[in-house]
Amino acid sequence: MEFFKRVTTIDFMKKRRTAAVFSMVVFIISLVGLVVKGLNVGLDFSGGVQIELSYPQAVVSGDVRESLRQAGFNGVQVQTYGAANAILVKLSPEGKSASEVNALVRQVLPTATVVQIEAIGPQVGKAMVHRGILAIMVCLLATMLYIALRFEYRFAVSAAVALIHDPVLILGVFAWCQIEFNLITLAAMLTILGYSLNDTIVVYDRVRENFRKLRGISVVELMNLSINQTLSRTIMTSMLTLVVVLALLVFGGEVLFGFSLALSIGILIGTYSSIFVAGALAVSMGLSREHLIPPKVALVDDLP
């Protein structure tokens, strides 16, 4: 625990050019994956059939999922809702009509009662995609405005670039590995935006505080000092959060796999980007003491 009790002296800014090259390469690879392979979108976006089932007793959702897969259905999503004997199923109809799906489900699951069955058209999925993109854009704009007002526009641009960097890398992993991307995964990505931003704000706040306290120190040295001062807090927060998310990844089952994987990748990438993307980019854009401290305040600080 001695590491967490002292301030490290790692020269992060010395590695900022190497980190920038690494980030650009991985970013481009992720974009290529999105263009060439595309996302393996779930039924939430592509459309399908949603069925509400009721059993006379509690049932294991995994058993229901396996039975439907053996019957030839793809993209099967099964979850309980309300009670242990109430099951919500989403699946791809594979060219079948709702009535044909209904008949086959009754045949495959004879002990289940079909409470309701409805088709989810692809237009609904497109609307969800548009709303998801809109949510991310609003998040980016609101973040830039907040940071520009609280800190300085160089910080706002740097934070926005970091926030774009993180989800694109996560999407790249999902595209190359063809892991299903659904609404739960989208929720994880929006969560990561807030998580990454929190780390970035902590560093920015320490930078401004150090600009007020310290004089005769270069911007690069001050950025390094600020990151090192907040490093123990960042590592402890990330490690503890990652332990919980990894538990979800291992024991959460298929339903939570995409969600927990996106969070796991996002925690690692978010910690990296708050240092090597948001912090380093602000330095590269010419950040100086005068940008964060008004001239009047600077005069008071310079008094002996």
Image (tube, rainbow, N blue to C red):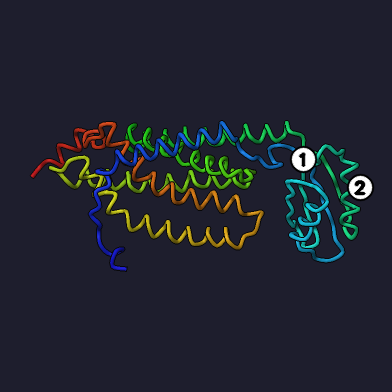
Pointer 1 and pointer 2: residues touching (CB < 8 Å)?
Answer: no
Mark 2: which amino acid?
Answer: Ala
Q: Position of residue 218 (x, y in %)?
A: 17, 40
Report the front residue among 300 and 291. Answer: 291
Q: Secondary structure at mark 1?
A: strand
Inspect this view and state whether residue 268 appears: yes
Q: Please tell me in which quadrant of the rendered image residue 35 appears.
A: top right
Q: Is residue 174 left or right of residue 110?
A: left
Asked if residue 146 can be seen in this view, the reply is: no
Q: Quadrant of residue 143?
A: top left
Q: Quadrant of residue 28?
A: top left
131 to the left or right of 21: right
Q: Position of residue 262 (x, y in %)?
A: 54, 48
Q: Residues within 10 Å of mark 2 (few under 14, many from 20)?
A: few
| Quarter of the figure that contains the N terminus | bottom left
Disc ID at residue 103: 2
SS for dot 2: helix
Q: Residue at x 31, y 53 (%)?
A: 230
Residue 48 is tagged as 1
Residue 146 appears left or right of 69: left
**In this picture, is 276 found above or below 79?**
above
Percent across and percent down for residue 292 are: 26, 37
